[in-house]
């Protein structure tokens, strides 16, 4: 571990439980948080054998983490940043996992039902008012058979995915690594790696793209000299 990270770790540890955080964790559940900066974070866990894990060097603020049911899991990787939103797991044997270095400005994640999972890879970037829901709160049944029609489906985002503001992703969708989904898009079907998708419902309009969090230095110098 570098000296800089050691200093940051001590800083995180000192600020780990600052004023404004709330906890409601029933017996038989696990919360594992160490070296995390949290402000106005509400962690609410009921049921049995649930666990919430937040890795070191992570920053969370204005966030609700709510778990109901049994044997569910919430995982937030190291160096992730979530500045607003909610993470809800309601069911059994379900999970929400947010990868290392992923940044979230404002998002609602909902894993609803049994064996319902939402997985975000490393270094993803999510804009404002994102909704990622892999199921419906209320079931719909077929009258003749009683069969449930709206079962949940897993959602997976690969590594280094960029979601523009107001994007909605529904159940059963996979977003390939390196892809971009444009502002106000509704994603109901999967898209491949390194693709650009826009629209409602979203369609792939460009393949073989790449994106970066910062502009290349030569482009910056070119702009300065213009």
Image (cartoon, rainbow, N blue to C red):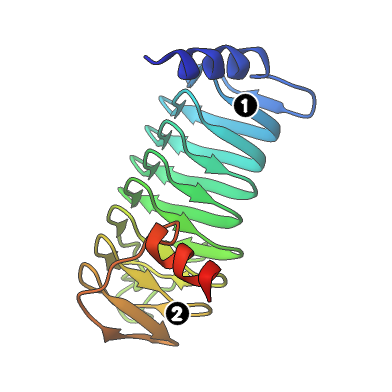
Q: Give the vertical position of 135 relative to 5 (above or below).
A: below
Q: Residue 59: in sight, yes or no?
A: yes
Mark 2 falls on what kind of element?
A: strand
At label 2, counting other C-alpha atoms closer than 10 Å, the crowd grade (few under 14, some 14-19, many 20 or more) is many
Extreme-right residue of the structure: 19
Image quarter for residue 144? bottom left
Residue at 58 percent of width and 22 percent of height? 26
Rendered location of residue 173, percent (x, y): 30, 68
Mark 1 falls on what kind of element?
A: strand
Q: Give the vertical position of 175 relative to 96 (above or below).
A: below
Q: Nearer the viewer, mark 1 or mark 2?
A: 1
Task: Identify the residue position indicated by label 2 in the image.
Answer: 186
- The count of marks equals 2
Q: Give the vertical position of 74 relative to 198 (above or below).
A: above
Q: Give the vertical position of 159 relative to 141 (above or below).
A: above
Task: Identify the residue position indicated by label 1 in the image.
Answer: 37
């Amino acid at each position: 571990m570098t000296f800089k990270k050691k200093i940051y770790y001590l800083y995180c540890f000192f600020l780990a439980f600052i004023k404004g955080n709330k906890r409601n964790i029933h017996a038989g559940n696990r919360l594992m948080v160490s070296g995390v900066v949290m402000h106005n974070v509400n962690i609410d866990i009921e049921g049995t054998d649930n666990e919430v894990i937040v890795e070191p060097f992570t920053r969370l603020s204005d966030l609700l983490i709510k778990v109901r049911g049994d044997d569910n899991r919430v995982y937030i990787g190291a160096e992730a940043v979530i500045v607003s939103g909610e993470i809800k797991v309601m069911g059994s044997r379900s999970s929400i996992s947010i990868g290392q270095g992923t940044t979230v400005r404002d998002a609602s994640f909902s894993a609803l039902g049994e064996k319902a999972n939402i997985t975000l890879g490393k270094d993803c970037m999510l804009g404002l008012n994102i909704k990622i829901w892999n199921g419906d709160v209320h079931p719909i049944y077929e009258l003749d058979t009683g069969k449930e029609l709206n079962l949940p489906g897993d959602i997976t985002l690969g590594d280094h995915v960029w979601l523009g503001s107001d994007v909605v992703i529904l159940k059963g969708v996979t977003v390939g690594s390196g892809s971009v989904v444009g502002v106000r898009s509704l994603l109901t079907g999967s898209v491949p790696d390194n693709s650009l998708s826009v629209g409602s419902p979203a369609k792939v309009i460009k393949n073989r793209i790449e994106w970066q969090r910062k502009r290349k230095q030569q482009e910056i110098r070119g702009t300065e000299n213009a």
